[in-house]
Amino acid sequence: MNRAKWDHSPLPANVHPIAPPRRRPYNRPDEQVSGRFDLSWREPTLNILDRFEQSFERLVEGSVGRLFRSPVQPAEIGRKLERAMTSNQVVSVDGTLVPNDYRVAMHPHDMVSFVDFVSALCRQMENWLGDLADERGFKSIDRFRVQIVGDEAIPRRAIQVTATISDRPEMGRTEQEALQQTEVFRVIRETSGMTPVRLRFTSGQQDGLEFIVRKSVTTVGRALDNDIVLESGDVSRHHARVEFADDALRVVDLNSTNGTRVNGRTVRSQAVRTGDEVTFGTLTAQVLPFQPEGR
């Protein structure tokens, strides 16, 4: 078999070697560089997904709610958002246009894990989508908007993201927040049958933090298996529970060391309503109405 011979003679003076093509920052997985698959296209995605997870963790850090027992994970949400953006892009004369309106749907029982910070989570997603578009050189016709909704048609542990290109100047942040809070109210009513209320802590390390009571029995204590985790030595591991029955909210003390008080009076079991103050050990929370906008 004849073999071709490589010519090592120097190039003529008027001939210049062709420089190798510059590697694009985002190659398809099946493209090759130097005879090997070029996986460098994955690095920016991994990096920005890492940033999404880190921002998500910072968002929920220090919350009094029991976090991330939900099977829905932030990285999965990020991947679905990215896929919805890149798979719906449109090439125009001004550049590549991507969707700006995103609907993140999950089962209502999964969504209730996020209701304490769902609005802040939507803002995090919107900022992350903006960063992703900037890194890819994409454009949008309006600001990025994300809404989280509960949908019984979505299986547990699953997420469905739909995205559209939409110019909606009437949908400001106030209107968007009202729409999101109304959806949270609906999901809580659907999953628990109760009207949600807020507990706003006014003392201790949790001062200023809020928790939405969203199910028929909510446990309070220092142990991590509680629904509301209070980091204080004055709070027992399993201190009390908040129950919803017969259209009424009730606080029940669980033989705690330092007791539970309603409006300053020590109680074993006591009905509470909006405006009351409940003290677990030395940590006080005010019972507030949920008050979704537009209802």
Image (cartoon, grey):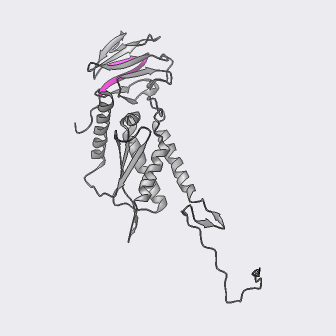
Q: Magenta residues?
A: 277-292
Q: Magenta stretch mostly in which secondary structure?
A: strand
Task: Report the front residue among 163 and 289.
Answer: 163
Specify the quadrant of the image occupied by residue 21.
Answer: bottom right
Residue 288 drawn in magenta: yes
Between 93 and 127, the residue placed more toward the observer is 93
**In the rendered image, the vertical position of residue 263 relative to residue 156, given as above or below:** above
User: Could you tell me residue 81's position as x and y percent?
Assistant: 43, 51
Report x, y in % for residue 128. 45, 50
> Which residue lies at the image location 45% right of the left edge and 39% below the top edge?
72
Q: How far across and how far down the image is residue 270, in percent?
A: 32, 13
In the rendered view, tell whether residue 65 sits above or below residue 176.
above
Along the line of sight, the residue nearer the viewer: 159 or 210: 159
Residue 33 at x, y = what percent? 63, 67
Identify the residue at image location x=38%, y=34%. 109
**Residue extending furthest front?**
1
